[in-house]
Image (tube, grey):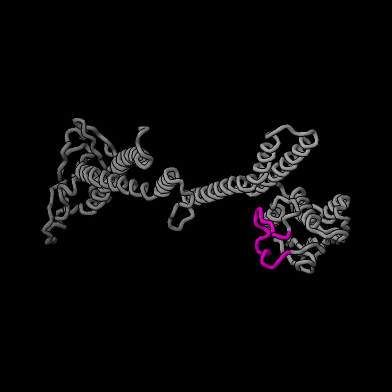
Amino acid sequence: MKKLSIRLKITLWFSIILIVVVALTYLVILSVSGQIIQKTIRDNLIQTVESNVDEVEYYSSSDMASTNDVDYYVRYGDGYIEIDDDFLDQVNGVYTSLCSSDGTLIYGENPIVRETAGLAFSDFQVQRITVDGTLYYVFDRKPETEGLEDMWLRGVVSENQGDAEMSDISRYSLILLPSLVLIAIIGGYLIACRTLRPIRQIADTAAQIQQGDDLKKRIELNEGDDELHRLAEQFNEMFARLETSFQTQQQFVSDASHELRTPVAVINAQCELTLEQERTAEEYEEALNVVWRQGRKMNRMINSMLDFTRLKLQPERYAKERLNLSELTDSVCQDMALIREKEITLTCEAEPEVYCNGNRELLTRLLSNLISNAYRYGKENGYIKVSLTTDRNGEITLSVEDNGIGISEEDLPNIFHRFYQADASRTGGGSGLGLAMAEEIAAFHDGEISVESNPGCGSRFSFHLK
């Protein structure tokens, strides 16, 4: 059982349940049909006797002289009992007989006349009597015609009268019900195969990805909105996320290898050079300073790459809340104004009570990166202007403007790429991840960053948030 496929298990359980239901249905059909047939037999008995009671009339001897009927006549007392020629001995298994009050058979037929001789007459009542293991229904009617006060009309029918009908019902049920079961099982198997096709496609796609390491493969299904289609969509989203994660990991390794190669090479070269011969204390100290600076550079670079990767792959770690962006901007500017690198002056003009839905840590990081970038590439005794405004449509604009060295037109499309540094800015000492991180934070908040710059005149970075 454990080795069977899901579709076979479903079909097997479906077949067992269906067979049990059909078997119970067959028993119910036989039971209900038997009750209906027995009721029909009794109703037919009553109807036949009721019809025949009107066919019996009494005539005196004088009346007989004037009648020309060809019906049957039975001598009774001073007259005759006329029985219509439509009065039959047996109709549809119902035997009708005319009897006297003491049970004597006057006319007709009764297959159990001796057994019913002791059965008292009861007008309008269906009585039961068992003879040789067979149940018979007996129905009596007393004629209301004058002269027949001592007469009874008795009808008798066997319960076995419905055996033929029951046999037909049983035979047809034994033919039709198994046929329906077989059709249902085949149909159920086909439906199970069709319904479980997405699961097979999911398994095949996962196997192809595992064998070929091709994360671009997706589960292709027809349109639908059932549970399996939603499951396939979830798997496609999972594959897409795995692909993104894998590509990010590869990019991280590639970037780390590329960017760390230079500081590692500097450290190795400095160490080899220093160890070639005995050095003075000042030379050893200078060598250690070089190693220390390169180590710090590597540490900043690794931390920046980890933060960037974490934000890209695990954005759910950063919860959003309603925060006062005006207070956050003022706070960051007050802290960073203390740097006063290159004697650059930092000013802030923030519109009061500007609120947004965002992550405080990330928005602080975005603004800090933009201000740090302005410090790094600013001019001596220059300025940095930070402003926060909203327009009539409620769009928030946070901008950082400087009068630094600016960015050339050919470099503008690339400045948000990771580790990209324009030629004029290589002396800045940055990791090349600050603007890329700022753009990723903007995208996390469903916003965007734009830049305007003139080489030699400065730049203006603007974060737009709706």
Q: Main secondary structure of the magenta part?
A: loop
User: In the rendered structure, does residue 167 fall within the stretch colored magenta?
Assistant: no
Q: Could you say where residue 136 lies in the image, as x and y percent from the top left?
A: 23, 37
Residue 309, image x, y percentages? 64, 47
In the picture as drawn, the residue positioned furthest to the front comes out as 277
Observer-nearest residue: 208 or 424?
424
60 and 210: which is toward the camera: 210
- Residues drawn in magenta: 407-424
Q: Nearer the viewer, residue 378 or 399?
A: 378
Whether residue 360 sits left or right of residue 215 in the image: it is right
Say which residue appears at 40% left-offset and 46% top-offset: 204
Please state the horizontal and vertical placement of residue 297, each as a whole percent of the image. 72, 44
Query: In the rendered view, does 92 fall on the left or right side of 315?
Result: left
The front one of 97 and 235 is 235
Is 256 drawn above or below residue 443 in the view shown? above
Q: For residue 419: magenta?
A: yes
Which residue shows up at 36% across the image and 42% down it?
7
Image quarter (top left, top right, bottom left or bottom right) of the C terminus: bottom right
Residue at position x 76%, y 50% in the image: 365
Measured as percent of width and height from the top left, residue 230 is found at 50, 51
Res. 440 visible in picture: yes
